[in-house]
Image: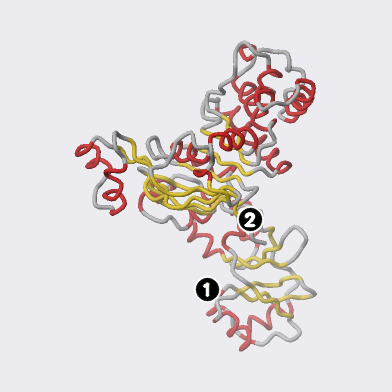
C-alpha cells in the first residue's frame, strides 16, 4: 500500500547574502559554483534545487557532513528559514503561504522540534519544561500537567518530574526535550542532530527508544545526522546532501548497494554491509515447483525470466536455483533432488546478510526467503550477496 505524502518539497533554493534574488537565476542555471558565487558576489548557496516527498509516519533521515545544508533544509519545514525560491506542502497546504497567525498555530500544533543541545529552561522542573509548549498554546494548567506526566512516563523518566535539568544526565535531558516535543501531539517531529551531543552508549539507547516510540506513535520524523550508522539504524529512508545539493535518496540498503555517485560511494565505503543490509533487499522472484512434476525445460524457461526455481517436496525446498545458476541445473539435478532427504535452509526476509551466512553454508548456493507468516517472498543467491558486499 502506498503511503500518503506528508511533506512535499519542490525545487527549494536558499541563497544567503545581501540580495539573493539578484543571483537566483544564475544559481538556477547551474553556471556558477558555490565558491565562485561567494567570491564574486558575497552570496552563499545554502540549498540548490531540493525536491523531496516524505511519506506520513516515516522516519526520514537527512544526512551529510558539516556545511551540507541539512540543518538549513529542516528549518524550512517550520519556516525558521525562508527559502529564496520553491514550494513546501504539508498535508497539501503551502506552508509558505501561511499568515503570521496561521504560522504560529502551525508551529504550536502541527510540528515540533528537538534540538541538539536540549534547549531546556534551567529554572524550570522537568514537568514544567515538558508542558511549556502546551501552556503557551493556551491549554489550562491542570490538563497540561496531566498530559506532561503522560509524556514523562512515555520517555522513561517517571520519578524525575520535579527534578531540574542540572540534576539530570545528558541522555535524561534529551528525553525531556523529546517529551516536550511529543506533548503537543504534533504530527511532525523535527530532530536536528538530537543525539549527537550524547556519549555513544547513551546515544544508542536513545536511538532504540526513538524506534520503540515510533512503532507506537507513527509520527512523521525528520531526523538530521552526520552519522551514517545512526541513519542506517533508525531511518526508513535516507537523503544524502553535499554542498546544498541532494545526491541520493533511498532506503539504506539501496544506497549501500547502489550508490548514486562517487561521493556517496566514498561516504558509505566503510560500512559493514553484511550487518546492515537485510536479505530481503537482494531477493529475486521465485517459482515453486513440485518434484513430482518438475520439468527441465520449464525450469530453464523460468530462469530465463530472471526468476528463481525452488524444487520442492510438500512445499519444502529441496534445492533452490537462481538465474545465475542456470548452467548447473541439469535433468540429472532434478533426478538427484527427487531422492534427496535433506532440505535447503529457509531464511526470514528481515534477517541481515550476516545472519544468513550459516544457512548459505548449509545450502547449495541459493536460499528461499519467507516472511514471518511463512509466505514465500523470493530467493537469494550467494553470488548476489557477495556482489552486494
- Between the C-alphas of marks 1 and 2, the distance is 38 Å
Position of residue 87 measured from the top left corner of the image (x, y, whole percent):
47, 49
Q: Secondary structure at mark 2?
A: loop
The residue sitting at 66% across, 27% down in the picture is 137
- Say how the picture is coloured: secondary structure
Q: Is residue 153 shown above or below 264?
A: above
> How would you rate the neighbour count of disc 2 (Cα within 10 Å): few for under 14, some for 14-19, many for 20 or more?
few
Q: Is residue 82 left or right of residue 383?
A: left
The quarter of the picture where residue 341 lies is: bottom right
Would you name the residue on which mark 2 appears?
A: 4
Q: Is residue 247 left or right of residue 355?
A: left
The residue furthest left is: 40
Q: Is residue 366 shown above or below 18?
A: below
The quarter of the picture where residue 110 lies is: top right
Q: Nearer the viewer, residue 226 or 283?
A: 226
- Tag 1 and tag 2, C-beta contact below 8 Å: no
Q: Nearer the viewer, residue 358 or 341?
A: 358
Position of residue 188 measured from the top left corner of the image (x, y, whole percent):
62, 41
Q: Is residue 95 shown above or below 282?
A: above
Q: Is residue 329 shown above or below 62?
A: below
> How would you rate the neighbour count of disc 1 (Cα within 10 Å): few for under 14, some for 14-19, many for 20 or more?
some
The residue sitting at 61% across, 25% down in the picture is 174
The residue sitting at 63% across, 55% down in the picture is 4
Position of residue 226 measured from the top left corner of the image (x, y, whole percent):
46, 37
Q: Is residue 243 left or right of residue 282?
A: left
Would you name the residue on which mark 1 appears?
A: 324
Amino acid at each position: 500500500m502506498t503511503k500518503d505524502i506528508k511533506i512535499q518539497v519542490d525545487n527549494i533554493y536558499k541563497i544567503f547574502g545581501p540580495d539573493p534574488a539578484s543571483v537566483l537565476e544564475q544559481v538556477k542555471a547551474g553556471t556558477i559554483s558555490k565558491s565562485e558565487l561567494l567570491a564574486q558576489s558575497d552570496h552563499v548557496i545554502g540549498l540548490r534545487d531540493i525536491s523531496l516527498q516524505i511519506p506520513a509516519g516515516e522516519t526520514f533521515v537527512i544526512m551529510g557532513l558539516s556545511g551540507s545544508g541539512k540543518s538549513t533544509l529542516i528549518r524550512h519545514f517550520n519556516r525558521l528559514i525562508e527559502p529564496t525560491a520553491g514550494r513546501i506542502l504539508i498535508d497539501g497546504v503551502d506552508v509558505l503561504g501561511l499568515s503570521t497567525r496561521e504560522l504560529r498555530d502551525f508551529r504550536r500544533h502541527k510540528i515540533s522540534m528537538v534540538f541538539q543541545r536540549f534547549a531546556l529552561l534551567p529554572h524550570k522542573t522537568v514537568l514544567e519544561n515538558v508542558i511549556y509548549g502546551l501552556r503557551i498554546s493556551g491549554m489550562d494548567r491542570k490538563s497540561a500537567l496531566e498530559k506532561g506526566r503522560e509524556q514523562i512516563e512515555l520517555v522513561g523518566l517517571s520519578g524525575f518530574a520535579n527534578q531540574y535539568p542540572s540534576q539530570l544526565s545528558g541522555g535524561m535531558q534529551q528525553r525531556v526535550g523529546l517529551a516536550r516535543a511529543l506533548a503537543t501531539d504534533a504530527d511532525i517531529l523535527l530532530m536536528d542532530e538530537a543525539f549527537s551531543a550524547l556519549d555513544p552508549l547513551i546515544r544508542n539507547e536513545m536511538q532504540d527508544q526513538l524506534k520503540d516510540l515510533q512503532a507506537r506513535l507513527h509520527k512523521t520524523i525528520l531526523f538530521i545526522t552526520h552519522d551514517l550508522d545512526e541513519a542506517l539504524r533508525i531511518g526508513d529512508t535516507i537523503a544524502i546532501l553535499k554542498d546544498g545539493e541532494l545526491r541520493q535518496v533511498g532506503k539504506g540498503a539501496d544506497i549501500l548497494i547502489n550508490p548514486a555517485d562517487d561521493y556517496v560511494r566514498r561516504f558509505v565505503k566503510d560500512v559493514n554491509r553484511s550487518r546492515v543490509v537485510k536479505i530481503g533487499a537482494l531477493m529475486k522472484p521465485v517459482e515453486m515447483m513440485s518434484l513430482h512434476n518438475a520439468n527441465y525445460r520449464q525450469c530453464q524457461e523460468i530462469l530465463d525470466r530472471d526468476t528463481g526455481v525452488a524444487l520442492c517436496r510438500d512445499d519444502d525446498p529441496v534445492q533452490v536455483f537462481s538465474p545465475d545458476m542456470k548452467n548447473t541445473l541439469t535433468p540429472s539435478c532434478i533426478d538427484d533432488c527427487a531422492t534427496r532427504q535433506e532440505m535447503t535452509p529457509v531464511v526470514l526476509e528481515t534477517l541481515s546478510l550476516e545472519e544468513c551466512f550459516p544457512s548459505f553454508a548449509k545450502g547449495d548456493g541459493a536460499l528461499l526467503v519467507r516472511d514471518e507468516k511463512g509466505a514465500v517472498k523470493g530467493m537469494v543467491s550467494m553470488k548476489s550477496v557477495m556482489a552486494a558486499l
